[in-house]
Amino acid sequence: MADIAAPNATVLAAGSRSGLHKLMQRKSTIAFLMALPLILLIAILVAYPAGYAVYLAMLNKSMSKFVGFGTFEFILKRQAFWDVVYQSCLFAISAVIFKAIIGFVVAHFVHNIPAKGQRKWRGMLLVPWVIPPAMSTLAWLWLFDPSYSAFNWIFAHFGISAVPWLGEAGWARFAVILVNIWAGAPFFMIMYLAALKSVPEQLHEAAAIDGATWWQKIWYVNLPMMRNIIAITALFSLIVTFANFDIVRVLTNGGPLTATQIFATWAFKVGIESGDIPQGAAVSLFMAPILAIAAAFILRNISKRGSEV
Amino acid sequence: MGSKRVSRRRFVGGTAALSSALVAAPFVRGAYAAGKLSLGLWDHWVPNANGATEKLIHEWGEKEKVEVQIDFITSQGNKLLLTTAAEAQAKSGHDILAMNTFLPARYAEQLVPVNAEMEKLVADNGKVNATVEYLGKVGGNWLAIPATIGSQIKGPCSRIDYMKQYAGIDVQKMYPAGAEPQDKDWTLDTFLKAAEACHKGGHPFGIGLGTTSDNVDTIGAIFHSFGAVLVDAKGEIVVKNDQVRQALDWYKKLMAFLPPDVAAWDDASNNKFLVSGQASMIMNPPSAWAVAKRDAPQVAEQCWTHPFPAGPKGRFGPFLPFFWGTWNFSKNVPAAKSLLMYLSQASSAEKMVVASGGYDLPAFEKLTKFKVWAEAEPPKGTLFSYPDPYHTQTLSIAAAPAPHKIAEQIYNLGLQTQMAVRYFKGEALEKTLDWASGELEGYMRN
């Protein structure tokens, strides 16, 4: 019996070993194992906090009772919340549009600078993006300061009356969007510049032979070649801008009244400052469906273009 | 190498002998025999003010053989608030934590009651004001000890010269140093006339209407002066009342004489407005004066801190207290209580007040006449009236007497300043009240 069983066991062991060996040799397994540290990191730093936020949002104000979607229902009925939705959309969409336009234009300028001096310009133009926003926004705060605005000081020299940069709802919204554009446009610029550099020169030469103007080259050559990068950059920036906290917090703290409150600052205001953590968590979670819709819309177009190619 | 076997009988015998010896041995008190204690205290604005507190705590630690660890946590960027929230969630952290205004009530279920300690402190140091009691005593239990460090009255800090020149008011005569106040005529009407005169003179009052603490504290005291309550002590919304209407009307008149951007002011704006020499008056503890003393001595020489004007329902001044709370997860509650009693003695409180240059304000009645306030200069006597030594005003907090969980939101979301700005910007009064009523309904959520 032992003589018969022994070869079978050996075959089985060898079989399972070769199965494991095969599994380990598969590209997908290796890819999974190599990505595992990152997956674990994301699970700890993203999935757990996100899950915990969902759990918190389903508690009552004193966090003693599970109320399901009660907190979400509550905030959907609050005018203050809808003001925040409007302001967040206005802030994020307008900032991303302007960042994309400025980034696109500046990328073309930089692309046309001779290679020798281009590095200098690239470095200088990236400065707003590499300064921590909380610090650069402080400098902007001094420029816009209600009482000592440097801009108003200059205006006064030209006889122009002072602008209530942070004191009026319209101007305050303009100010926070402007600072966000200033800080974020270099990211678009560098991404678009990279995309421009990957456009084959032959296409431009062919367009030139066909008598295309500079505008036609941009419209019929550069733009189609850059579409995917434009879309992905816009999506990435939309996510980051939507979740912005520091610029609004430092510049206006959501004011005047609540005219510049956006999701993150409002969540902090009601959750941490006013002691309603479940409501704060629920407010911040509302960013997810809005961004998911935006992502689905933008990525759907990308896959379309991919299949066209 | 041979080994020696220990039999079971021999092991049991040896262990028993060792145990007997340990129990019979005399108690030898080690360097830190009474354990450890960690504190998270508010990091003071005033340079070197932390030093006095640190010294007092270490003195106590040496005496009581307790190893003490102190973290001074800044309130800049809400770091102290975030630390409190994190420790409450984690049920772990410091034994004692500094908490301001509504936080003891927010964390009532996680704090160790200090009824016996407060009874003793009141017997020694005198009564505490009603605001401290409202904020620190919940459901009949004292939840925390009123802290000297960081507690403050945000009263008017007036420019002596501008008030005299433009409004014809001698603030030094009205609130003389070392003597009883002569403030019979210091009313909200006089205040409004003075605001108008100073505005015309090019040096307006610097009173913010943003949603941060300084702004909310001021409007809170003015509302109290009119008897204007938004939510009563039972939690009923009573915002649509004549007192609130009167208070908003008064604020509308005042705002016409304030800088045009006050709706965007934060807690630093009024300080800057004073130090720059533009303001005839701001509402602030003496920190703005202290900065002026360092950066603009000519401004500091003209500053005089004094109580609020009186309204139809009396004279109210905003008091912003800090508390020292002991978490119920603390492993050394007796030591925590002992330290807090030590820090609350009159002699300890005076050392802290002196180190803060008079900024800190003990909540106890008998601790409002330390020499430091009478001697502070320039000008001599500038802070004499800061602690309200003659108790001419009722110390208050915005949103009281509403239940804490509602009041906290009225306060932190700046509901009263928002109402004033809306009305000032042209919204019909009843519409503003409707809007406020809707907001308050939202605050009722449990």
Image (cartoon, rainbow, N blue to C red):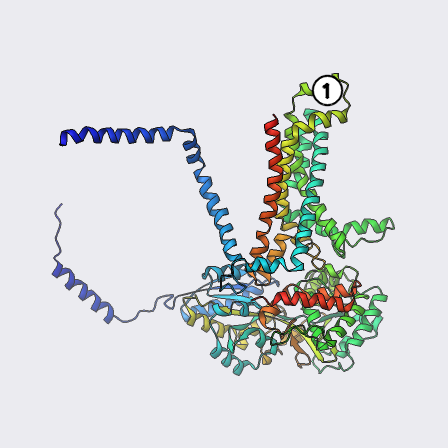
Q: Tell me the SS state at disc 1.
A: helix
Toward the viewer: B38 or A241? A241
The reply to whether residue B106 is in sight is yes
Report whether A214 appears left or right of A116: right
Residue at the disc numbered 1: A207
Q: Position of residue B362 (x, y in %)?
A: 59, 74
Toward the viewer: A14 or B275? A14
The reply to whether residue B382 is in sight is no
Which quadrant of the figure has residue A35? top left
Question: What amino acid type is highlighted by mark number 1?
Answer: Ala
Q: What is the total number of numbered labels drawn onto the structure image?
A: 1
For the N terminus of chain A, give its image quadrant: top left
State whether residue B399 is above or below residue A305. below
Q: Position of residue A306 (x, y in %)?
A: 59, 29
Q: Which residue is farthest right?
A: A159
For the C terminus of chain A, give its image quadrant: top right
Which quadrant of the figure has residue A201? top right
Q: Position of residue A275 (x, y in %)?
A: 57, 63
Give the chain of mark 1: A
**Badge 1: few (under 14), some or many (20 or more) residues near its Cα, within 10 Å?**
some
Report whether A53 appears left or right of A216: left
Toward the viewer: B246 or A290? A290
Which quadrant of the figure has residue B408? bottom right
State whether residue A84 is above or below residue A30. below
Q: Position of residue A205 (x, y in %)?
A: 71, 18
